[in-house]
Amino acid sequence: MSTVRAAATTEHRTTVRSLAARKRRGERFAMLTAYDFAFARIFDAAGIDVLLVGDSLGNVVQGRDTTLPVTLDETLYHTRMVARGAARALVVADMPFGSYQVCADDAVRAAIRLMKEGDAHAVKLEGGTAVRETIRRIVAAGIPVMGHVGLTPQSVHAMGGFRVQGRGDADRRRVIADARAVQEAGAFSVVLEGMPAALAAEITATLTIPTIGIGAGVECDGQVLVMHDMLGLNDWTPSFVKQYADLGAAAHRAARAFAEEVADAKFPDTEHSYR
Ligand code: KIV
């Protein structure tokens, strides 16, 4: 790639290096999930630094109970759309369940597809000490990896439900060891999900890579929310979510108004008809 082209593609783009620099400067950053071009463009223009094509798409887009059924091809489909809408945000694709657990070779192949066919800039995978070698192998292939420890939704059945992690002393030590393992393996950042704020603060102070919290208190270097939760597009939102808009209610009102105007033959009126 020529230097001119390299400058054009990375000048204003959030990168793994700029996120590391922000941690050093103590500047927080924001990540939102996105699953399509339209919302990726809105969030990108609004200054969201990182767009995550989360496997939460299984829940909020596909209407499933867990993230487990999401496939690599589905993730690729959504990642491509998000990448097209992201002019400056870093696009991270979540590695779906089954794409990295069997062996590191599979994991590297899946991560390469997400970068090559999905136009992602990085991948994310869940787990700590158990996936240390897998992270190493993906990083060795030149692919930036975001880790994810604490409440890891792909292990919902092993955890016995969506439960806050790291509450007892032994569990607290396990989550800390997981976060350290992710950093040692070469990840550029790590999501801390569903854990006491004090534990996330301790991990954030110990690690040199940025932490990104969800249900993990305010002391993380960045924060992430699932877009459907923060925009009011779900029936139910977890208690740690702040709803910043009620797009669900707005869409309901708009659809009702449309249906009523169609029934009353008020739409389309002359303004919205061709002469
Ligand atoms: O899939 C997802 O949306 C995630 C975030 C909750 C971090 O992993």
Image (cartoon, rainbow, N blue to C red):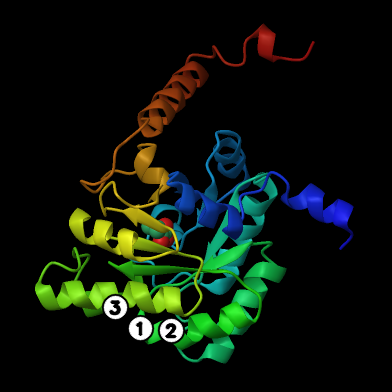
The residue labelled by disc 1 is 129
Query: Does residue 219 lie above or below 145 as drawn?
Result: above
- Secondary structure of the residue carrying numbered label 1: helix
Q: CA distance from mark 2 to mark 1?
A: 5 Å
Side of 78 where 170 appears, left or right:
left
Expressed as whole percent of the image width and height from the top left, the position of residue 204 reads 33, 59
Q: Nearer the viewer, mark 2 or mark 3?
A: 3
Q: Within 10 angstroms of label 1, few (less than 14), some, or many (20 or more) residues?
A: some
Residue lying at 62% horizontally and 82% vertically, measured from the top left: 140
Q: Amino acid at mark 2?
A: Arg
Q: Amino acid at mark 1?
A: Thr
The residue labelled by disc 2 is 132
Q: Earlier in the sequence, mark 3 or mark 1?
A: 1
Residue lying at 27% horizontally and 53% vertically, measured from the top left: 215
Q: Quadrant of residue 247?
A: top left
Q: Quadrant of the N terminus?
A: bottom right
Q: Amino acid at mark 3?
A: Ala
User: Are circles 3 and 1 on residues that touch, CB within 8 Å?
Assistant: yes
Expressed as whole percent of the image width and height from the top left, the position of residue 212 reads 39, 55
Q: Quadrant of the C terminus?
A: top right
Q: Within 10 angstroms of label 2, few (less than 14), some, or many (20 or more) residues?
A: many
Task: Give the numbered dot on residue 221.
Answer: none
Tell whether circle 2 marks a residue whose Cβ is less than 8 angstroms from ligand 1: no
The residue labelled by disc 3 is 177
Can I make out residue 225 in this image?
A: no
User: Are circles 2 and 1 on residues that touch, CB within 8 Å?
Assistant: yes
Q: Nearer the viewer, mark 3 or mark 1?
A: 3
Q: Residue furthest front?
A: 25
Expressed as whole percent of the image width and height from the top left, the position of residue 209 reads 45, 63
